[in-house]
Amino acid sequence: MSNSGYAKNKDQQFYAYYDFIEETGEVIYCGKGTEYRSNIKRSYKRNKLYNDYTKNKKVNRVIIPTLDEDLAFKLEDWLMEHYHTWIDDPLATKHACNIDGPGTNLGGKSMAQSSKQKLREKALKQVPMNDEAREKCRQASLRRPPFTQESKNKMSESAKKRKRLPVTQITRIRLSESHYKSIRQINIITNEELCCKSVKEMVELTGFPGSSITSAARYNLLYRKTYRYQYL
């Protein structure tokens, strides 16, 4: 991928841009962002449509700088309407890659309503793992062939090269105590809550790894882009 028209003026903080295939000139995506986001070399976290179509293609980007963020939003909407890169546009191009249409992108201020609806529908379709499914997973792990001595040696060498900071006694105590704290799970899509007396109980009810739950609670992270955990 190459970057076309990248602005170097540090005073210009916001950008609207569009991406096009160099070989055909077809515009496939329009966006808005800051100087960091507008750099095409850093734009690897795109949706699946964009990533699949541009995998083996050379993409160029044209950038329009502005000092006004609201103007950047308006430019992004105009570009989508002009080049028909929104997938639900009646005149959408064959390889349109904008999932959210004009007027719905808020640049991280809040998730677009259409995106919330898609995540909610996806979450409702997921079937929780039952005891039979858990047993099948356990049996599958038991059938996995053991590591060869050569593989063990490679993993051992790789581990030795990694720099590891020593774990202090205070950290060990905190990690141990965290597994016995009361904790709450919040589904940000359905707003459903699940409260447990300990992380161990949460693991038994949900089937999720305890380390993932404690990390999400400690650092205020989303687990599987759906669940938030809070110590009580």
Image (cartoon, helix red, strand yellow):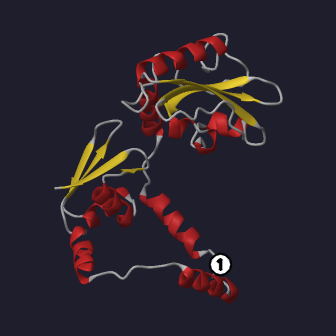
Callout 1 amino acid: Pro
Q: Nearer the viewer, residue 2 or 216?
A: 2
Please give left or right for residue 76 compared with residue 107 in the image: right
The residue shown at (33%, 81%) is: 167
Please give left or right for residue 37 compared with residue 200 in the image: right
How many marks can you see?
1
Position of 51 relative to 13 (above/below): below
Position of 73 relative to 190 (above/below): above
Q: Secondary structure at mark 1?
A: loop
Residue at the limit of the structure toward the left, as seen here: 232
Report x, y in % for residue 29: 63, 26
Position of 55 relative to 65 (above/below): below
Report x, y in % for residue 139: 55, 70
Task: Name the quadrant of the C terminus.
Answer: bottom left
Task: Name the quadrant of the N terminus.
Answer: top right
Residue 38: image quadrant is top right
Residue 211: image quadrant is bottom left
Position of 62 relative to 195 (above/below): above
The residue shown at (67%, 10%) is: 91
Q: Nearer the viewer, residue 81 or 34?
A: 34
Q: Which residue is mark 1?
A: 145
Q: Nearer the viewer, residue 37 or 174?
A: 37
Report x, y in % for residue 58: 77, 38
The residue shown at (64%, 20%) is: 85
Please give left or right for residue 87 compared with residue 94 in the image: left
Q: Residues within 10 Å of mark 1 (few under 14, many from 20)?
A: few
